[in-house]
Image: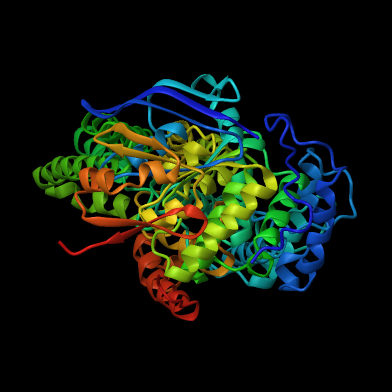
Amino acid sequence: MADLSRPSGAGRTSASPTDPPPPTTGRGDAASAAAPVSDAGRDAAASVVAPSPDADTAGRGAVTAGVPVRRAAGARPLASLAASGVLLAAMLAALLIGAADIPPGKVALQLLDWLPFVSADSGLAPVEQGLLAEIRLPRVLLGAIVGGLLAIAGAGYQGVFRNPLADPYLLGAAAGAGLMTTMAIVFMKGDETALPIPAAAFAGAIGGVLLAYALGNVAGRGGGTATLVLAGVAVSSFLTAIQTFLQQLRVDELQRIYAWILGDVGGGWSQIALVAPYAVVSVVIMLLHGRLLDVLSVGDDEAVSLGLNVARVRLVVLLAASLATAAAVAVSGLIGFVGIVVPHVVRRLAGGSYRTVLPLSLIGGAAFLVLADLIARTVLAPAELPIGVVTAFVGAPFFIAVLRVTRRVET
Amino acid sequence: MSHVRVRDLAVVLETRTVLSGVGFEVRGGDWLAVIGANGAGKSTLLRALAGVLPCSGEVLIDDTPVRRLRARDRARLLAYAPQAPALPVDMTVFDYALLGRTPYIPYLGRESRRDREVTASVLERLDLSSFASRTLGHLSGGERQRVVLARALAQQAPVLLLDEPTTALDLGHQQQVLELLDRLRLADGLTVVTTLHDLSLAGQYADSMMLIAGGRVAASGAPAEVLTERLIGEHFDARVRVGTGAGGRPEVHLERP
């Protein structure tokens, strides 16, 4: 049991508990300074850390170095580094390998040449250079952006709903986007390129989520999430029913509709420009809320008793995650599996704090989709597999393998 | 030490009045045990005090009207642990205890060195230092209860509201947790309000008791005044014999009808 003979490390003087914490002097520090000693005996790699760079940028009380205090979640430089390495390797591989018969060595030289202050002669013909710059490079980048967005949105949804089965399409984003896109294809005549599919998909995704949210609020009082999930299920079924009906009316368009649903990240630079602003805004908002999602994870009552405005945090993260989903769906279709699986793999490998899960899902989702797209366009080259098929076909066994390797006792 | 005074507290959920006219006082550093039959409103009372449920009436801590405080400021005065706290299996003990520092961390900011120091020293006090990097999924029932207590203590609030802190613990661990709680409150001058379903345990540790029945205060006072055969028979619908144990504290024994 606890040794109470030493002065309280909590250092609370009974006089006025509402005062801001006193500076690090006084009786509280005897225990504080002593604490890290026992820390040192622990799992050295993970727990005892000298002031981390993150702590220094915190700008709050992190000035005095020297007292090693256990680092909290979120700052996992090793894991982030490893994930970034995997992403870079995946992007590099995706750039070097492709359907067109260009030697990877020359592609590498060409990529070096494009770096600022570097000059290398790749010997690639202008046509090949153009292919690289206008098709392969944007395709890899768009894949990374879409994968990152879907994965971080999935993590955000899981945090908001405290439900491991939540994915970015939970609240009707997919059904809404599917319906609007189908309507665009079915009702708007014109050639392929003139169809405003990204706009329709984006509006449909946002509309679906808002509809579910509005219905959930009407049906359930008290801000619970269970009603919201059910509303999402209802809205999804309803919108999908309309979409299926429209699809049946115009069987001749079936293939185009399915091609869109199964996903594609070959949209080029214009699509990247389209998605970038939404991507940046939504990702920044979600990354800022990692710690608050951790607070939410202990339950609404406790989060409220800790002074958190639970409803506001939920709404903000929900909006940001839905924006990310809508942006991704608009430029790539309904790519499944990334949003639910990547966050869980991250959790298994790097821990459950949202301060870790959100950034690592972003990086991991990007790497995953870049690799999936690489497989999609090379396995049956020159034909392409739909990327949504690859994510599930490759992702499911991979997920099972991760679950098996990191298997644990369920409590 | 913080004096708690509650006047005319009422909680209405939907249209149902769950609590009404509840008033009591706890002197700074005292331990109040709230007892009552299932559904009497004990948990509701604690949740209302913690700001989780909307309520009417007056809640004063050292003359500060708690209900008018911002949520963050309230959280620096009142720490609350529910009956069955959600413990995310993936979260480490340290990170969980660190959540207690939430009222001191800016909305989108991150914890300071001091927040980590406070958390580390609380874990040390509760003998949890060696568990710090273990995940919550790998703890026993007694360890979990101590971790929840650590989170509440990291909050550095002068008033602790604990809903059934001994649920799901075996006899020995019940005793250990309550002993620990008693020593902590004496060392730090904490004011403690707990609900406890075990009447004898409640009688042994509390300075004062309050019996709630049908959403109202049915009796309050020293343990010997509240734990009487008549009151327990009337409000718990149970047949008991009340004896006197060590230190003159009442002991409640069930009797077969």
Q: Is residue A259 above or below residue B57?
A: below
Residue at 21 percent across and 25 percent down: it is B15
Percent from the top left, x then y, of residue B3?
A: 58, 30
**Res. A70 image quadrant:** bottom right
Q: Is residue A69 above or below residue A109?
A: above
How is the protein colored in the picture? rainbow
Q: Nearer the viewer, residue B247 or A357?
A: B247
Please give the count of numbered marks on the rendered protein: 0
Percent from the top left, x then y, of residue A320?
A: 48, 37
**Position of A367 compared to B222: left or right?**
right
**Position of A25 compared to B90: left or right?**
right
Percent from the top left, x then y, of residue A331?
A: 43, 44
Residue at 56 percent across and 59 percent down: it is B179
Residue at 40 percent across and 32 percent down: it is B48
Residue at 47 percent across and 35 percent down: it is B50
Q: Decide if residue B42 is in sight here.
A: yes
Tell me the quarter of the image containing the N terminus of chain A: bottom right
Q: Nearer the viewer, residue A61 or B216?
A: B216
Q: Decide if residue A99 is in sight here.
A: no
Q: Nearer the viewer, residue A9 or A286?
A: A9
**Res. B52 image quadrant:** top left
**Position of A201 compared to A142: left or right?**
left
Tell me the quarter of the image containing the C terminus of chain A: bottom left
**Position of B78 compared to A208: left or right?**
right
Percent from the top left, x then y, of residue A252?
A: 15, 49
